[in-house]
Structures are given as C-alpha cells and as structure tokens.
Amino acid sequence: MIFKNPEYLFLLLILIPLIAGYVMRLSKSDASLQISSTRYFAGFKKTKRLYLRHVPFALRMLTIIALIIVIARPQTSDSVTDSTSEGIDIMMAVDISGTMLAKDFRPNRIDAAKAVATEFINSRPNDNIGLVIFASESFTQCPLTTNHAALISLLHSVQFGMVDDGTAIGMGLGSAVSRLRNSHAKSKVIILLTDGSNNTGDIAPLTAAEIAKQFGIRVYTIGVGTRGVAPMPVQTPFGLQYQNMPVEFDESTLAQIAQMTHGKYYRATDNNTLQSIYQDIDKLEKHKLEVKEYNRRSDVYTGFALLALLLLGGELALRYTMLRRIP
C-alpha cells in the first residue's frame, strides 16, 4: 500500500500534545478525601464505569489516526512489467594467491579488487554475475545469480588461505568457462584478475582460452601490480613479513587470452587504475533493455473512513450512555 499524499501523515504528531494534555488533565482532576481507614470500602466492587473511563479518549485518538490516513489517500498499486533484454552473464575469476596480499594497492591487492568488484556489481543490477576464486586450485564461490546482495556478501568473505597457495590461472579460467558454457545469454563474459604467472593446475591458460572461444565467451584479463618493486609478503621464521620485491607476472599470456576471445587486456598499477578498468569494461558490456511498465492504483481510503465513523460512534455511545455525566 502506498499513499497519494504522504505528507499528511505528519499530522499524526498532533497526537503527542493531545495525549500529554489528557494525562495532565487527569492528574489535576483527581479529588482527595482524608479518612481514617479504607477497610470499610474493601467490599465494594469496581464498576464498569471505572474500567471504561479511558476508552472514549482512546477511541477518539484512533478516530483521528483513521481520518489522517484517509486524507493521506492510501492506495494499492498493481504493477505489470513487460521487458525484453539481451542479457549478459558475467563470471569474475579472482586470484587469491599469497602475492595478492602485496601492499602496492590500498590496503592490499585482494581487498582493493573486492572493493572495485563490489562497485561493478552494484552498477549492473540486471545482469547475472558469478564468482570463481583460484590459487593452487579453483572453485566457484558463487554461481551466476541476480541476487547481488548474496554475491557481494560471498565476495567480501574471500580471503587468502581459503585454498593452498599457488597460481592456477588455467584452472580459474576453466572453472569460469564451465559456469558459462550452458548459458543462453546473448553475451557471455569473464573478467579474469591475477597478479602472477600460471605455475600449477591441470589446464594451461591458453587451452582454457581456446575453450572459452569455442563457447563464444569474451575474456577481459586484468594484470595487477605496480611497475618496479612492491612490498610482497614473505614467510620467515618470525612469521609473515613484507619485503620490497620486483613485480613480475605473465603479461604476454594474459594479453593472448584476451586477444583469442575478442576481449581486452588491462594492466592495473594502483587502486585508481583498477577502478577505471572496471568502469571501462562496464561501458563495453552494456546490454539492451526495453521495459514497458503499467501501474494501476486503486484508492482504499473508504475502509479507513468507515472505521473512523465506527470509532466515533463508539465514543459517542459510551459518553451518552454508560459514561454519561450527571449535571
């Protein structure tokens, strides 16, 4: 239910001074009589008049509430939407290997990737989007879904250590392809984000790219890492420590994957460039959506008007019968 004139609901605030005034009036109208003992009154039963003395005021307050709702014009809305779209199915494949903890991004590469991916998901409310994560192996963190709140929650729960360390780019890409191969969407896209070179897994990256090509899947590859050196996590006898190390990864393979699948390769060197890359992909992968929407609204204030009339009648009936004051 919606209201045609919702601003009139602020009139409900007048109930506060009315109730306060009623309470103050009651406190001042109590009569007092000093007697030596109340035991003589113990046998007297309380009359119905005593129990009902506050009911007229309560009925009047309810009457006012019902009348305010009437002038706010409550309505029911029946909405019918007829839409046709060329939908896009998008799988995000994100590297969660140890080097993704490097601090050349704020606060590190994994958290920066999650923050930017969240903005990307929120910018595409009509698309099916899923998530694959990979290190030494890969698995689907979230299948294709339009429930983006659940997807974002699962994305935020991603962290280093969920799988053994390593960089199986081919496995990550292969898992994303597997999720899209049976898709009937007009456009199928994978966004592959990594900061390393393939060093484990049963599938070579270019083999996975060839499979993606056969299924008509475009792959956008993102290489993450500043140019030069970056604070990298290193396991030492004293625990995990950061040391400046050269940033190296297999840009050539990532570029080949994008070229083979008619996608595009990007190099992200900091948070800002990573954000602009996702914005660029967002512009490239726009879908057509035509929506015809019909709204039918019906007034339902009649019921509240009848309720106000009944409440008012109940108040008057009590005041002039059981609670009638004798002059």
Image: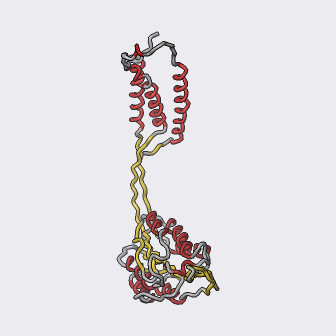
Using the rendered view, name the quadrant where residue 245 is placed: bottom right
Q: Horizontal and vertical percent for residue 84?
A: 40, 65
Q: Is residue 189 above or below residue 12?
A: below
Residue 100 in sight in this render? yes
Q: Is residue 247 above or below residue 35?
A: below
Task: Look at the image and tell me in which quarter the N terminus lies.
Answer: top left
Residue 266 in sight in this render? no
Is 88 displayed left or right of 283 in the figure? left
Q: Horizontal and vertical percent for residue 292?
A: 43, 58
Q: Horizontal and vertical percent for residue 65?
A: 47, 34
**For the point 41% across and 28% down, which residue is it?**
311
**For the point 39% across and 54% down, which residue is it?**
80
Residue extending farthest left:
182
Q: Nearer the viewer, residue 262 or 116?
A: 116
Q: Horizontal and vertical percent for residue 188?
A: 43, 76
Q: Is residue 113 above or below residue 59?
A: below
Using the rendered view, name the quadrant where residue 303 is placed: top left
Q: Nearer the viewer, residue 3 or 30?
A: 30
**For the point 52% across and 29% down, which residue is it?**
19
Is 93 displayed left or right of 103 in the figure? left
